[in-house]
Structure formats: structure tokens, C-alpha cells
């Protein structure tokens, strides 16, 4: 089984790239290597899975459609072996339902084809950073709830600390056994970035208020900014293929794919994210 120690200054992050298109693999290898990453190449899902079982990787970047052993199968195998390793899937147009399935199955993010290399670099950095937010396991047992309220300036560097605090709460109440899933962290990062960037315009005089309510079976996080809001009723449908590359449409797509519910207030400056777990899932984790 592979393991990952996260990124650090002492080693290059190791990325496993899997795609049955030779040109895509070579493009990703050249680009990511030039950015300082150590890349291992696989030309189908089965080869990628074999490499993953025998070498440590910090991240996996895989095509969704591959013959024999596809991206979903590879994702499931990796998450069963080591759920801490972030997996980002590359999807061509026409795969929206499969992308949603992958995000709900634990994928950290996705990249549409044709590839935008700047977006690729952003997602790689984000996924590696999220995987490093790791609270310790809790010794608290039983049925407890926790309500946490945080107010923060609109500063990007505060986002990781907020996600860390919510992850601690998730572990403390038993919603997560050892850590919050990486794709739930991604949803929190997207929502917080939206509030600070689009809501408060990165104005540090304007605050973002976060209220997190957690128990074993539900995580509800409400994020309020002090901006003017937006007409969320008029937003383009983010599930339409042509809108997946649009910044706000992409963010809403990710949130709705990962979470069970995403709500806005009438003004559009408050967002509520809800993720539920069944009692059976929680009992299995506590066993």
C-alpha cells in the first residue's frame, strides 16, 4: 500500500499521471516537471494502479475514460488503499454525470479537455495543499454536536486555517474518523474563496462570518460575506457543458456535485453547504 507524507520543502511532490493518450501524458510530464514536480507516467489505468501500489505518491492525475481500467475504477481503488492521496480526473465534454459521480466518490477535483495549463497548475497546488490539512484523531466518544463561529478578514492565507478548524470539529463529533475528506475540504475552500473574492472583493476591512454545525451525521456550514451579493437565480446552469470553464459556474458545479445541498439567501451574500452521512456510515466508523 502506498503512503504519502504531504508536501514539504525537503522533497518534490510526486505526481502519478495516467492517460491512454500518449500526447497528453507527455504534455503533462513536461509541464509539471518544469514546475518542480516529480512525475511518473502511466499509459492506462491498470499500469497506474500497479505503480501506485508499489511507490509513494503525493497526488494522482488521471484521465476519466481509459480502456480496461478507467478513471472511476482507479479512483475507487486509490481511495480504498489510501484516502489521503488527492485524485484529480481529466474529463472530456459529455461526461458531466460521470464527473459528478467521481466527485461524490472522493475525487478532489476535475479538469476539462482541452486542458488549460494555468488551471492545471492552480488545481495541483490546491489539491496538494488541501491534503496537508490534517487534524489528529479524537478520543471523544458518544453522540455530540459542535457549533463553531469564526469571523475573519478577506485574506486568502486564512482559508487553510478555517478549513483546519472545521476539520477538527468534524473529527471531534465523529462525522470524520481521522480527517475530513479532501473533496469536502475543496468545497469549503471554493465557498470561502467565493465569499472573499467575489463577495468582499478581497477588501480586508470586510469580514467573512462562518458558522459550522456538525454532528456524527451532518455537516452544515454557512458562509456570509459583507458584499452586495449577486443574482444567484440568474446564474447560468453550471451543469451545462459550455459553462464548466466559467469561473463562477465551475465553482457552483463543484459545490453542488460534492455537497448534498447548496443554498443561497435572497441577497446572494450567504451560502449554506450541507453534507449528510447515514447513521449506518457513522456507526461503521465508530466500530
Image (cartoon, rainbow, N blue to C red):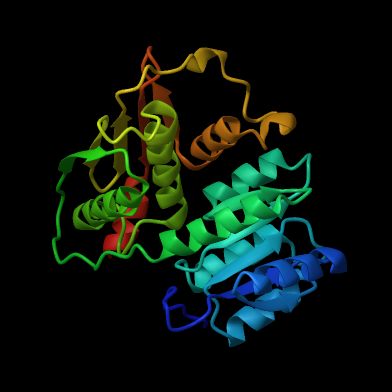
- Foreground residue, 103 or 161? 161
Q: In this rendering, does residue 127 appear at all?
A: yes
Residue at 79% over, 48% down: 114
Left or right placement of residue 94 versus residue 252 in this view: right
What is the residue that sits farthest to the bottom in this orientation?
54
- Foreground residue, 78 or 30? 30
Residue at 51% over, 68% down: 80
Residue at 39% over, 27% down: 199
Give the percent coordinates (x, y) of residue 91.
73, 50
What is the residue that sits farthest to the right in this orientation?
22
- Please tell me in which quadrant of the rendered image residue 132 appears: bottom left
Q: Quadrant of the C terminus?
A: bottom left
Give the percent coordinates (x, y) of residue 117.
69, 55
Left or right placement of residue 63 versus residue 172 in this view: right
- Please tell me in which quadrant of the rendered image residue 25 appears: bottom right
Give the percent coordinates (x, y) of residue 14.
57, 77
Left or right placement of residue 83 versus residue 91 in this view: left
**Vertical comparison of 96 with 287: above or below:** above
**Vertical comparison of 255 with 85: above or below:** above
Figure disc tally:
0
Left or right placement of residue 286 versus residue 253 in this view: left
- Please tell me in which quadrant of the rendered image residue 36 appears: bottom right
Q: In this rendering, does residue 21 appear at all?
A: no
Amino acid at each position: 500500500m502506498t503512503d504519502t507524507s504531504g508536501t514539504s520543502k525537503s522533497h518534490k511532490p510526486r505526481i502519478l499521471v495516467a492517460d491512454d493518450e500518449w500526447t497528453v501524458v507527455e504534455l503533462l510530464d513536461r509541464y509539471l516537471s518544469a514546475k518542480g514536480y516529480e512525475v511518473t507516467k502511466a499509459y492506462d489505468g491498470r499500469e497506474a494502479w500497479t505503480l501506485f501500489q508499489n511507490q509513494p505518491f503525493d497526488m494522482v492525475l488521471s484521465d476519466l475514460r481509459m480502456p480496461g481500467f478507467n478513471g472511476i475504477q482507479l479512483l475507487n481503488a486509490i481511495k480504498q488503499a489510501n484516502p489521503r492521496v488527492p485524485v484529480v480526473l481529466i474529463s472530456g465534454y459529455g461526461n458531466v454525470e460521470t464527473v459528478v459521480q467521481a466527485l461524490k466518490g472522493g475525487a478532489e477535483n476535475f479538469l476539462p479537455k482541452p486542458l488549460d495549463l494555468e488551471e492545471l497548475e492552480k488545481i495541483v497546488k490546491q489539491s496538494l495543499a488541501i491534503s496537508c490539512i490534517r487534524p489528529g484523531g479524537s478520543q471523544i466518544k458518544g453522540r455530540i454536536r459542535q457549533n463553531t463561529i469564526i469571523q475573519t478578514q478577506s485574506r486568502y492565507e486564512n482559508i487553510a486555517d478555517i478549513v483546519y478548524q472545521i476539520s477538527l470539529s468534524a473529527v471531534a463529533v465523529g462525522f470524520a474518523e481521522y480527517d475530513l475528506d479532501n473533496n469536502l475540504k475543496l468545497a469549503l475552500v471554493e465557498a470561502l474563496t467565493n465569499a472573499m473574492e467575489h463577495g468582499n472583493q478581497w477588501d480586508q476591512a470586510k469580514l467573512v462570518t462562518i458558522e459550522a454545525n456538525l454532528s456524527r451525521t451532518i455537516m452544515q456550514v454557512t458562509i456570509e460575506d459583507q458584499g452586495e451579493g449577486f443574482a444567484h437565480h440568474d446564474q447560468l446552469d453550471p451543469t451545462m457543458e459550455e459553462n464548466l470553464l466559467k469561473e463562477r459556474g465551475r465553482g457552483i458545479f463543484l459545490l453542488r456535485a460534492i455537497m448534498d445541498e447548496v443554498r443561497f439567501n435572497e441577497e446572494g451574500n450567504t451560502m449554506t453547504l450541507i453534507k449528510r452521512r447515514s447513521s449506518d456510515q457513522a456507526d461503521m466508523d465508530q466500530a
